[in-house]
Image (cartoon, helix red, strand yellow):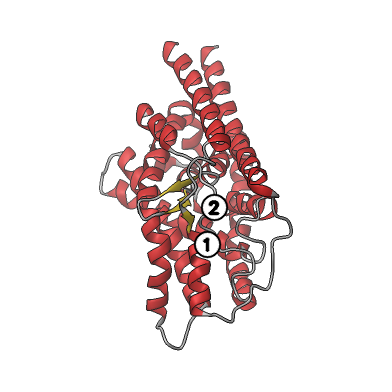
């Protein structure tokens, strides 16, 4: 496992030119506002849940920082895809599985704000939409897939891999749907527009999602080696 | 004991390697267009009259400025992760 992780680190080459989030100003005002309103309850619930977890088990503070840092690192690397374009990983599944899906709204919004303010990547006006696709769709899908895979008695490594893979793909499917909804045209159906956006986002993302799956499984395994007892206190499902 | 040492060294080498790549390799291969740029192309096609109603407050100047800031993001994240593993390793040694 460790060797695979290291090999992947070495293979990853950061690229210039940009990647995944909806750019500043590229959602009409009403849709920008809509997604902010939709995302806000998840952020509030996530913040409360995280606060309670950190109060109940203060030892896991450092682990949450690691989960957020994982999102930070993975979303800073742009990777070329066989589809001929580049995109980046998200890292959201790790924290979602360890701490619960809603807590990733907090980590997600921090990373997206950092990128919007300092790197002109994504945007403040599109923060709600980008946060919803990454930190809500990505996080909840990861947890659901992990639970399903665990019920099917798949190995933990495979369950984590699948959760991260599906989460990564669904983030981009969600982004495609958000754009298709916002830019409906008289000539094309919603499905046709969504397919157009997905042909860019989702296809690029398939090979990257595989890398994300392996990376997440690798780091998860390392964290479980070091901090299993603390994690079981906040998430008994991780046995 | 030997394993822990290997993990520490691995983390440091990978972290430094990633940061170095962020600085030096970004210039070597840059012909892959970002998916968000492609999405903007589709938006222009679907809604040719759409004008973005907001712009980024600030943009990093020049390609190196951008690379440096991305490297800063990577360094921050890797720093936290490395700190955790090194602290855990030293705790387990005690």
Q: Which residue is mark 1?
A: B37
Neighbours of disc 2 within 10 Å: few (<14), some (14-19), many (20+): many
Residue at image location 56% in from the left, 17% down from the top: B91
- Residue B50: horizontal and vertical position, in percent? 59, 79
The answer to which of A151 and A76 lies nearer the viewer is A76
- Which of the image's four quarters has the N terminus of chain B? top left
Could you give the CA–CA distance between mark 1 and mark 2, rounded to whole angstroms? 8 Å
Relative to residue B86, is residue A36 depicted above or below? below
The answer to which of B54 and A224 lies nearer the viewer is B54
Relative to residue B84, is residue B58 depicted above or below? below
Q: Residue furthest bottom?
A: A186
The chain that hosts pointer 1 is B
Total numbered labels placed on residues in the image: 2
Q: Kindly state the secondary structure of the residue where label 1 is placed.
A: helix
The answer to which of A20 and B67 lies nearer the viewer is B67
- Residue A206: horizontal and vertical position, in percent? 35, 53
Relative to residue B48, is residue B34 depicted above or below? above
Residue at image location 31% in from the left, 46% down from the top: A150
Residue at image location 51% in from the left, 37% down from the top: B25
Mark yes or no: residue A59 visible: no
| Residue A194: quadrant of the picture | bottom left
Neighbours of disc 1 within 10 Å: few (<14), some (14-19), many (20+): some
- Residue B18: horizontal and vertical position, in percent? 52, 33
Q: Kindly state the secondary structure of the residue where label 2 is placed.
A: loop
Relative to residue A212, is residue A231 depicted above or below? above
Q: Which residue is mark 2?
A: A17
- Callout 1–callout 2 Cβ contact below 8 Å: yes
- Which of the image's four quarters has the C terminus of chain B? top right
């Amino acid at each position: 496992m460790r060797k695979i992780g290291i090999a992947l680190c070495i293979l990853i080459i950061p690229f210039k030119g940009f990647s995944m989030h909806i750019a500043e100003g590229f959602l009409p005002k009403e849709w920008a506002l809509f997604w902010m309103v939709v995302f806000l309850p998840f952020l509030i619930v996530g913040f409360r849940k995280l606060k309670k977890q950190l109060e109940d088990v203060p030892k896991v503070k450092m682990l949450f920082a690691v989960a957020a840092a994982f999102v930070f690192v993975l979303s800073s690397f742009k990777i070329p895809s066989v589809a001929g374009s580049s995109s980046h990983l998200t890292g959201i599944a790790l924290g979602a599985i360890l701490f619960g899906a809603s807590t990733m709204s907090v980590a997600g919004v921090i990373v997206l704000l950092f990128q919007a303010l300092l790197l002109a990547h994504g945007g403040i006006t599109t923060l709600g939409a980008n946060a919803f696709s990454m930190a809500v769709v990505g996080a909840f899908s990861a947890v659901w897939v992990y639970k399903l895979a665990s019920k099917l008695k798949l190995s933990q490594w495979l369950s984590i891999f699948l959760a991260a893979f599906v989460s990564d793909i669904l983030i981009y499917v969600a982004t495609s749907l958000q754009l298709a909804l916002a830019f409906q045209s008289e000539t094309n159906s919603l499905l046709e527009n969504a397919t157009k956006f997905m042909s860019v986002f989702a296809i690029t993302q398939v090979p990257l999602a595989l890398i994300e799956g392996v990376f997440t499984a690798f780091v998860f395994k390392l964290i479980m080696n070091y901090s299993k007892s603390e994690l079981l206190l906040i998430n008994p499902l991780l046995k | 004991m030997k394993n822990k040492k290997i993990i520490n060294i691995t983390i440091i080498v990978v972290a430094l390697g990633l940061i170095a790549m962020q600085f030096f390799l970004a210039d070597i291969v840059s012909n892959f267009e970002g998916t968000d740029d492609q999405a903007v192309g589709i938006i222009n096609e679907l809604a040719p009259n759409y004008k973005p109603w907001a712009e980024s407050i600030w943009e990093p100047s020049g390609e190196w400025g951008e690379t440096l800031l991305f490297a800063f993001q990577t360094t921050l994240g890797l720093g936290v992760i490395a700190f955790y593993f090194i602290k855990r390793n030293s705790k387990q040694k005690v």
